Amino acid sequence: MRYRLALIGLVLIVAGSLLASRVQTSGGVQIGEAHWRTAEGAEMSGLLYRPAGLEGGRRAPAVLLSHGYINTREMQSPFAIELSRRGFVVLAMDMTGHGSSGGNVGAAGFGGPSALAFLRSQSFVDPQQIGLAGHSMGGGPILAAAHAQPDGYRAMALVGSAPGLFGPPDEVRPDFPRNLNVVFGGLDEFAGLMWRSPKGTGLPDSAKLKQVFGVASAVEPGRVYGDPALGTARRLDLPHVTHPWEHFSSGGVAPVVDWMQARLEGEGHPLPAGHQIWFWKEIGTLVGFVGFILVLLGVFEAILALPWIGDLRRNPEPVVAVRGSGGWIALALTAVLPALTYLPFMKLGELWLPSAHFPQWIQNQLLAWALLNTLLSLLAVPFLRRGHPDFSLDIPRSSVAALAAVGAGALALLAVDRLLHVDFRFWVLGFRPLEAPRWGVFLTYLPFWILHSVILVRGLCALLAVDGAGRRSTYLTAASVLGGGFLVLAALEYGTLFSTGLLLTPTAPLNVIVGLQFIPLLAIVGVISVFTWRRTNSYLPGALICALFLCWYVTSGTANHWSPDYPMTFPPAARSR
C-alpha cells in the first residue's frame, strides 16, 4: 500500500507522544509555555509544570531548572517530571542563546535572574520556598540568579557543575550557595574543569570542593554538613555515571529530588526519591523519533505516485558487478575518516568564530569538520575510481520531493510540540521545532550542508550500487559505514573512561559527548540515502533530505553565540558544556 509506511510512522508518533505526555502529566500535572523578558529586554522561554491542587489560592514550593550548554529545556524533563509529580511547581528554562530564548550565550546572567523573578511572581508559588538546580553550564543561570536575589531561594543543586566557573566569580562563604547539594558523576568527563580533580571519583579530595564545604579533610559523600536552618547545609552525591548520564539516570535524579523534598517546605506529595517514572517519557519520545523517520520516508514514497513528481521513479542501476578490494577500501575510508578527523577538525573549526551571519560556534565547527571531509573525499576520488555511475539527476523534482518529505515531518513535530509539549528525542539525541527567529540561521547554513550531503550521499550510493546486492545488506552496510566509525570512536573513548577514569582524549570532553549523537544521526543518513536511491536511481533526493534534516537538527538544538541585542561574550569555560 502506497501510504503504509507513512501511516505506520504516524501511528508511532501519536502513540509515543501520548505516552510521553501521559508520563509528564502524571498525577494531574499541567504543562504550559512560559514567556518573560530579561531586564535587558531579551525574550525568554521555558516550560512551566503546575502540580494538581493549586486551586483556591494555594501556593506550592517551586524549583527553577536549567539545562547545560547546547541543550534545551526538554533535557531537564527527568527532574521536572519527578519534582512536579511530588507537588513542586517547576520552571524548566531555556538559557539565553538556547532553544526558544533570545540573546546569546551568557547574556543577562544566562537568563537566570529573570527566570527566578518570573517564577517568584507566580500567584501559585510560595516565594519563600524556591529551589534552584542546574546541570553543567546550567550552573551559570542559577548561580547568577542566586547572586541577583540572595534571599530569593532556599536551596540549590549543582549537577555536574561547580561554583566559580560560569558567570560572575563566586566568593566562598559558608552560606553561599545556600544549602548546596553537589551531584557529580564518578565518571564525569569534566571533573578537571569543574573541580580541578583529575577524575570524578577523586572529587572528595578536591581542594576546591573542600573549600566550598568549609572542611579540611576529604568530603564524605552522602553526609550533610552544616545547618539547613542557617543556609549552610552541604552534601555531596557521587553516582557512578558520566556527565550526560547525570540528568538521565536514577542515580543523578534521585539526589536532587531528595534534597529539594528535604529543604523546601510545603504540602506536596512526598515520594521516595528512587520512585521514578521519567524514563517512560524517554521511551515515548524515542518511539516518536522512529515514527518521524518513517514519516519522512513514507511521504517520499507516497508522492512518487503523483503526477510530475512520479517521473523521479527509476530502478537502481548497478555500477559494478562485484565489490572488489577497491570498493571495500573505499567503504572502510568512508567509515574511518570522518571519525578519525572529527576531533582535530572540530578543534580547527574553533577558528571559525561566531558572527552575525554564522552565530552558532558549534555549528561552525561541525561544518568545518563536514566540509574538510568533503574535500578529502573529492581528493580521494581519482585514486578510488570504480565504474561510472549512471545516476538520474532531476533537481526540480528532487527538491520538491525532499521539501515535501521533511515538511511532513516538521508538521508532525510542530503538532506534538504545540498540543502535548513533547518532541522527538532520546538521551543526547533531541529533535525540536525550528523556532521562527532561527529560520534565518538555518537558511544561512543550509547551502553548506547541501554541499556536504551531495558529495557524501553520491559517493555512498556509488559504493553500494553492486549488482545483486540484497536490500537488507545494503541498508545495513550504509548505516554501519556512516555510523560505525563514531561507534568505534565512542567505544574507545568510553572504554578508556570506564577502565581508567579518564577519556582517551581527556582534553576534548565536550566534542566527545557531541560525537555520541552522530552514531544514530549518520546511521539515519545512511538509511535515508539507500531508501531514496533504490526508488529513484538518484542520490540527489536523499542528499537534499539529509541536508535539511541535519541543518534543522543542529540549528534548532545548538546555541547562538552572537545576537544583535548583546555583545558577544565568551564566558569562562564556554567550551565546557
Image (cartoon, rainbow, N blue to C red):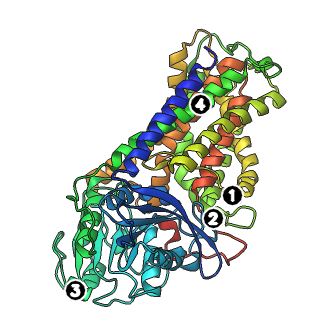
- Residue placed at 35% from the left, 43% from the top? 280
Cα–Cα span, label 3 and label 4? 55 Å
Tag of residue 295? 4
Which is closer to the viewer, label 4 or label 2? Answer: 4
Q: Can you give x and y, in whole percent of width and height, for residue 134 in the image?
A: 40, 68
Q: Earlier in the sequence, mark 3 or mark 4?
A: 3
Check contact, mark 4 vs mark 2: CB within 8 A.
Answer: no
Circle 3: element type: helix
Q: Can you give x and y, in whole percent of width and height, for residue 332 in the image?
A: 53, 31
Inspect the image, locate mark 3, and give the three-letter code of the amino acid beneath it. Ala
Q: Earlier in the sequence, mark 3 or mark 1?
A: 3
Check contact, mark 3 vs mark 2: CB within 8 A.
Answer: no
Work out whether 365 lies above or below 538: below
Which image quarter: residue 181?
Answer: bottom left
Q: Earlier in the sequence, mark 1 or mark 4?
A: 4
Q: Earlier in the sequence, mark 3 or mark 2?
A: 3
Q: Mark 2 — residue?
A: 560
Which image quarter: residue 555?
Answer: bottom right
Tag of residue 229? 3
Tell whether 316 sits left or right of 46: right
Q: Camera-side residue: 247 or 325?
A: 247
Q: Mark 1 — residue?
A: 438
Inspect the image, locate mark 1, and give the three-letter code of the amino acid beneath it. Arg
Inspect the image, locate mark 4, and give the three-letter code of the amino acid beneath it. Val
Circle 4: element type: helix
